[in-house]
Amino acid sequence: MLYHLPNFAGSTVSLDNLRDRGLGYAFETSIGLANTTQTDGPAGEARGLVVGMERAGRPVGYFPDKQTWQKIPGLDAWVGFYTGQAPGPNDLARSTMLDGHAVELGDGRRWIVPIAVGGPEEGDAELTRYRTLPHVDRLDEDGNWTVGDVLPRYAPLWDAAAAWWDAKWSAAGEDNEAADTGDAIRVIFKIDDARGAAVTILAANYRVSAIEVSLLGLLNDQTRVAILDAAIDWPTIAAWVQKKTDQQTPDISSTDAGPPAEHPATGQPSPTSGD
């Protein structure tokens, strides 16, 4: 991606400068690895800086007849790319990637959606979930090591996945509206909430925010649900349930994905601690 910073006086930019403009998420490495060009911008503002990674045939600069640009809502910055050469998962991957499911998104490419809570393993007799995100190790009052909270940088991912898990299991989340439908509870997971959660999940593995996801056309009715399902390892759960159903296990109904699971609260033990 390319970023234009209007009214930027200098010829070089630091990571702190980018963070001040709200673009800290887009650059992980030293800004020395990127190129900058002083130029006019996509909206005709006073000269500013274009920042991005140099690629063959794609110099860093403002070339309106060859590029697609959009203002970033709420920020004094624009984002763009060379038309017909939209960045993909390999271009935008973070230096540290979380394991997950490969999901084809709206651009036709496969992106790794991180798993926040893993489904049951092969030998599990009951529907078991495992927290898969990196966490802090803590000492309790007795001096014993325990599993602490998810690392702060992954807390938004955890919260987004937990909200979708609640919706999947018809357990009303704090921001969801539950309506009694007789024998069951129907949970309304608002579309904008689903979009926001999908972006949060993708941002754990990729240097994107809502504007990049929108500009690249990654989300639609199908892909946003696929992202949310992948984050809670729903493909693994569905396969496990299907196998139990095929085996006609007495306590697994052919129409029930297992007993409603408890909210995967922060601090849930990891598999190595016996859960």
Image (cartoon, rainbow, N blue to C red):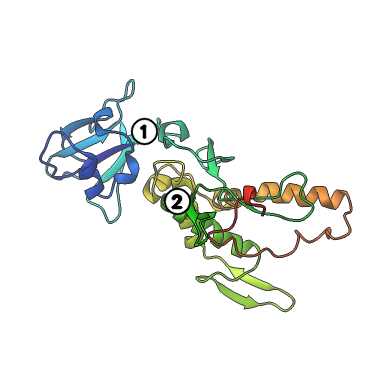
Q: Nearer the viewer, residue 256 or 37?
A: 256
Residue matched to label 1? 83
User: As displayed, is residue 26 above or below residue 252?
Assistant: above
> Can residue 75 be seen in the rendering of this structure?
yes
Q: Position of residue 17 (x, y in %)?
A: 20, 44
Residue picked out by circle 2: 151
Give coordinates of residue 207: x percent, y percent: 39, 41
Give me the disc on residue 20: none
**Is any atom of residue 64 visible in this view?**
no
Within 10 angstroms of label 2, few (less than 14), some, or many (20 or more) residues?
Answer: some
The span from disc 2 to disc 1 (Cα, nearest Å) is 37 Å
Rendering coords of residue 187 (x, y %): 61, 69
* Amino acid tagged 2: Leu
* Up-down relation of residue 248 to residue 78 (above or below): below
In the image, is 59 to the left or to the right of 190? left
Count of labels in the image: 2
**If the image is split into quadrants, where does the C terminus sit?**
bottom right
Q: Are marks 2 and 1 in contact (CB under 8 Å)?
A: no
